[in-house]
Image (cartoon, rainbow, N blue to C red):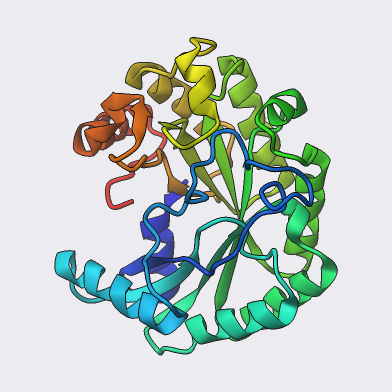
Amino acid sequence: MRTANQYYRQRFGCKVYKLSLDGGFTCPNRDGRLGIGGCRFCSGAGSGEFASAGKGVADQLARAKKWVEKKCAGGKYIAYFQSFTNTYAPVERMETMFRAAMEPEDIVGLAIATRPDCLPEETVALLARLAREKYVSVELGLQTVHNDTARAMNRCYDTDVYFDAVRRLRNAGLEVVTHLILGLPGESREAMVESARQVAAAGTDGVKFHLLHVMADAPLAEDYAAGTFRCLELEEYGEILAECLRQFPDTAVVHRITGDGARRGLIAPMWSLDKKRVLNYLNDLLSGYGLLDQRGL
């Protein structure tokens, strides 16, 4: 398997950085169309804690570039619409926003995070048109294939919707990246590995693995405080992650092996705050198994 860093270098011939943006979107299980409160693991920022703040796309891109350039110079960028559901809007609004993000020469493409149930045909057609001009990947927030877990987490769609979305996106020539969370309440190691197996079989081009974080403003914080579940320890997470990675073909691109919970508001697991230690541990473990050398991710 390739890391995202390796994949982007092969595709674009240089280092590529993602610039996280907030398009001002919401979500159908926040605004009442399907539900309220969002998924129980989702923070008030809609998983966009690290998205750049700013009024418009151009302003956000400029701010995000400055932040990257403080740490690393050179390379190109992918505009990443991260917060909430970025295809939950009229097509005209999406096209205006996405084209504004694609316009700068140093932006090589778009990454658009969304829900599988927010991809009507006219939206898929728009994304396919944009992909003929620049690189476009669609990131689907699945998290688990198990409908009982999904209902408990207030995901508000069945897993068959995900499989249909992957099929339609790939038929349209679009690249698909799937998000999975390891450590959701009630899921065994076998259940998490089964999610990975089914996602691989569905034909996703890439995968992002996230450690379950309990954030203070997420509904799941109430369950954690009540003691109804515990978070994974680092060693547990590493072994489950390794088994999940074994389910994917060598052609799959691994975009992330763990997620970052914002320091402010994180309740658990606190070990995840030591990012350097966590990544070093996972890198040693996975490379030792011959699965992935994820330095540079």
Up-down relation of residue 100 to residue 2 (above or below)? below
Residue positioned 23% across, 68% down in the render = 67
Is 54 left, or right, of 249 in this rendering?
A: left
279 to 229, vertically: above or below: below
x and y percentages locating residue 255 in the rendered image: 45, 50
Q: Residue 209: x percent and y percent? A: 49, 39
x then y, percent, for residue 92: 71, 83
Residue sitting nearer the eye, 196 or 91? 91
Is residue 184 visible in the rendered image? The answer is yes
Residue at 50% of width from left, 35% of height from top? Answer: 218
Residue for point 62% across, 38% down? 39
Q: Is residue 61 left or right of residue 173?
A: left
Which image quadrant for residue 21? bottom left
Q: Is residue 114 above or below residue 111?
A: above
- Report the front residue among 69 and 76: 69
Q: Residue furthest top?
A: 227
List x then y, in percent, for residue 60.
38, 75
